[in-house]
Image (spheres, helix red, strand yellow):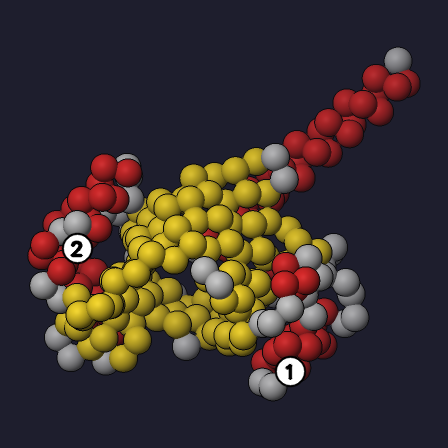
């Protein structure tokens, strides 16, 4: 289960201020800060059966490690920017998964076996990518352990891209109340607005724009050929 808050960061200057905030460092665990270079590829079938079922299948490199992730069932508890999702992560040794992932890697879970039924033998294709640097700060706050992640990079679908600049606070152990309390403090400190869309949702929207543009160009070429 993944429980996290997401906030928009309006500028790189604000990003740096949050990253270097002495107040945040008061709660940071010793040695709990690191920078991770991430590249993520998202996959679906040609008829978008996973997206239509609110399932995200992702292969992501985190520095030298590759992880396969399955996420599903977004819950809405009425708190803007709060996301509660079921999640499965498995280590991946084969880099070819970035081009042709095998859904069998999730077979050890019941949800992974359900995934195979949903896909029903259809081939998976890359639909969009994300490339970003994540700066992670492990926090000890209240009765909880959480992680503040500051992400900076881009979401890419075909020839289209969307800047990615946001803060995530993920609860590792403890209480959701501590997570919300810390989120309110950092949001108030920097006048942060909740991010109401996941990275995946923004990628899906960008993909739709890319496909609309491709279709419009194809229609234009067809009309030109008939003129």
Q: CA distance from mark 2 to mark 1?
A: 39 Å
Residue 207 vs 94, above or below: the answer is: above
Looking at the image, can residue 50 be seen? no
**Left or right: where does residue 84 sit relative to residue 173?**
right
* Residue drawn at (33%, 56%) of the image: 35
Residue 129 vs 220, above or below: the answer is: below
Q: Nearer the viewer, residue 52 or 204?
A: 204
Q: Earlier in the sequence, mark 2 or mark 1?
A: 1
- Residue 168, image x and y in percent? 31, 58
Q: Quadrant of residue 135?
A: bottom left
Q: Quadrant of the N terminus?
A: bottom left
**Left or right: where does residue 188 sit relative to residue 209?**
left
* Residue drawn at (30%, 61%) of the image: 34
- Residue 101, image x and y in percent? 67, 65
Q: Secondary structure at mark 1?
A: loop
**Which mark is drawn over residue 107?**
1
Looking at the image, can residue 213 be seen? yes
Label 2, residues with CA under 10 Å away: few <14, some 14-19, many ≥20: some
Q: Quadrant of residue 52?
A: bottom right
Q: Quadrant of the C terminus?
A: top right
Q: Quadrant of residue 79?
A: bottom left
User: Which residue is denoted by mark 2 in the rendering?
Assistant: 186
Figure label count? 2
Residue 9 vs 123, above or below: the answer is: above
- Residue 203, image x and y in percent? 53, 48
Q: Nearer the viewer, residue 175 or 133?
A: 133
């Amino acid at each position: 289960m993944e429980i996290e808050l997401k906030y928009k960061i309006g500028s790189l200057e604000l990003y740096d201020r949050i990253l270097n905030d002495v107040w945040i460092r008061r709660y940071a665990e010793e040695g709990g800060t690191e920078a991770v270079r991430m590249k993520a590829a998202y996959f679906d079938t040609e008829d978008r059966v996973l997206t239509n079922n609110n399932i995200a299948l992702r292969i992501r490199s985190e520095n030298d490690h590759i992880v396969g992730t399955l996420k599903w069932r977004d819950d809405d508890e009425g708190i803007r920017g709060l996301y509660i999702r079921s999640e499965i992560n498995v280590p991946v040794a084969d880099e070819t998964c970035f081009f042709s992932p095998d859904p069998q890697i999730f077979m050890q879970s019941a949800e992974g076996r359900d995934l195979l039924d949903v896909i029903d033998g259809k081939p998976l294709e890359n639909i969009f990518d994300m490339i970003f640097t994540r700066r992670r700060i492990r926090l000890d706050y209240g009765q909880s352990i959480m992680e503040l992640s500051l992400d900076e990079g881009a979401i890419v679908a075909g020839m289209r891209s969307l800047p990615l600049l946001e803060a995530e606070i993920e609860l590792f152990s403890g209480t959701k109340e501590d997570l919300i309390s810390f989120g309110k403090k950092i949001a108030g400190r920097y006048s942060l607005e909740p991010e109401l869309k996941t990275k995946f949702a923004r990628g899906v929207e960008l993909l739709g724009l890319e496909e609309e543009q491709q279709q419009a160009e194809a229609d234009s070429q067809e009309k030109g050929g008939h003129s």
